[in-house]
Amino acid sequence: MSKIREKLITFIIICLILCLRIPYINQSPYEQGERWRQSDTESIARNFIEHRFNIFYPQFNYDGPMPNYVQLEFQVTTFLIAILYKCFGYKYMLARIVPISFFIGSCVFLYLIARKYYSIEQSRIALLLYGIFPINIFFSRAIMPESSALFFYLGAFYFFVVWIEKVQRKYIFLASIFTALAISQKIPTIFIGIPMLAMAIHKYKMKIFKVWELYCFGIISLGTPYLYFHWIKNIAEFKFVNDIAQKHIFVRFFQDFFTREAMEFFRDKLPQGYTLQLLCLSVIGLILMNWKDEFPIGIWAGAMALELILIVAVIRLYYYLIFVGPLIALMASKPLNMIWRHKYGGVWMTLIMIWVGYSAYISLVPFYIEKTEIIKQANMVKKYTEKEDLIVVGTPDPALLNACERKGWRANIKYYDYIPKDPVEEIDYYIKNGAKYFVPMKGWIANDNGEYKKYLDNNFTKIIDEEGYYIYQLQ
């Protein structure tokens, strides 16, 4: 009966975590929060269906006519979304179900990891915290690969811990597959290898070099993503992440962390993602750590701190902070569990959770705001143009192009050497390459001092709808 009760309580917590992701589940990717990345991800799923249904050939809608193969992570999330789209039609709810499902799976792995080191009560607290972090609530339902990366990342750690305990080959095989998939989703998850190596050294000492399973683990977990990234680099037309490590990260190791920009990023974004209260509790939990029994967790925490210093401080993308979440949940659960055991622990825990929930709500509201002007401008384009028409948008953010469900270019971004920088020559380049319409964002063109718009006004027909949105007919 105690085991049934334990599973039932855990199940209820997971159901609560799931319910927090139901609001806005059918909302478009054109939210205030990460609309660029969300709309790109969703467009890849559509392009699998409409152009090439092959997971190894992801395609963007820009810059230019198809195929527009792009160098990105292994497309697990988008391919699953494409399968759902193919079966049930284009519904944003289906696109969000995929990352939500991956996140719920990661919750299960986090709980299983916690149970290896902590009591049932503390494990439940860690699970609840992991599920209510503001950053996790938003990105776990965002149309992005972060949830799948968390799922494989936590699964890899769990299966490796089980292998260390039981030394059964199936677990090291599962750990290697999950590690490979985690790295293929987000390269910074490679830092999970540090606590894995520490556990192996602790168990085998100098005999570690004779453990052939570890060689197989290394080949699968590192070799497979290497082959994929090498493949995608060769077929991609636009190498957005090509040599990003050599160009941006390696040359700035340990430097950017001490810059004012990095300090301000962490000062603002860490409390936004995890709340100041829980960050303070996680520091207390780290201080209270029993290193003899919890050293894999401690090494893991150190590894992710290194990831913050080496990677996040350089890139400074909010969603890259998501990989420290499991550690913050595990660390903060320790002092909270001590509070729970107090005579009035239930009252204090309730007050703390209410405060965390309120902080999460306040921080998340702006992220959910839908950019209706993008949708209205896109609807106007869909009304006056054909599906196969190539268009040019006046925004560096491709969300407008994705919302239009058209292919084409982003104007005046001055990114590609082969596209002229002069407005007249640039427009002429687009026309020669098949562009039929130019779409400003409700009249706005990025980086324009007035010259670009003046040329369009003087030389091309303007199509205007009843709400004042308009496009230019180029040919």
Image (tube, rainbow, N blue to C red):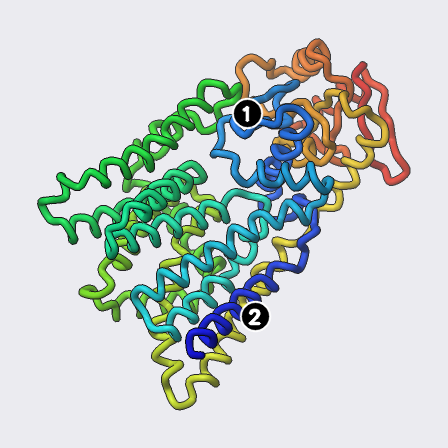
The number of discs equals 2
The residue at which mark 1 appears reads as 57
Disc 1 marks a residue whose amino acid type is: Tyr
Quadrant assignment, res 407: top right
Which residue sits at x=48%, y=69%?
A: 10
Q: Is residue 122 above or below residue 464?
A: below
Which residue sits at x=42%, y=71%?
A: 125
Q: Is residue 4 above or below residue 270?
A: below
Q: Is residue 368 visible?
A: yes
Image quarter of the C terminus = top right
Disc 2 marks a residue whose amino acid type is: Tyr
Judged left or right of residue 46, residue 278 is: left
Which residue sits at x=63%, y=15%?
A: 422
Instruction: State the SS at label 1.
Output: loop
Residue 414's tag is: none
Mark 1, other Cα within 10 Å: few <14 / some 14–19 / many ≥20: many
Judged left or right of residue 434, residue 170 is: left
Query: Residue 290, percent across and down?
Result: 22, 68
Which residue sits at x=48%, y=48%?
A: 318
The residue at which mark 2 appears reads as 358
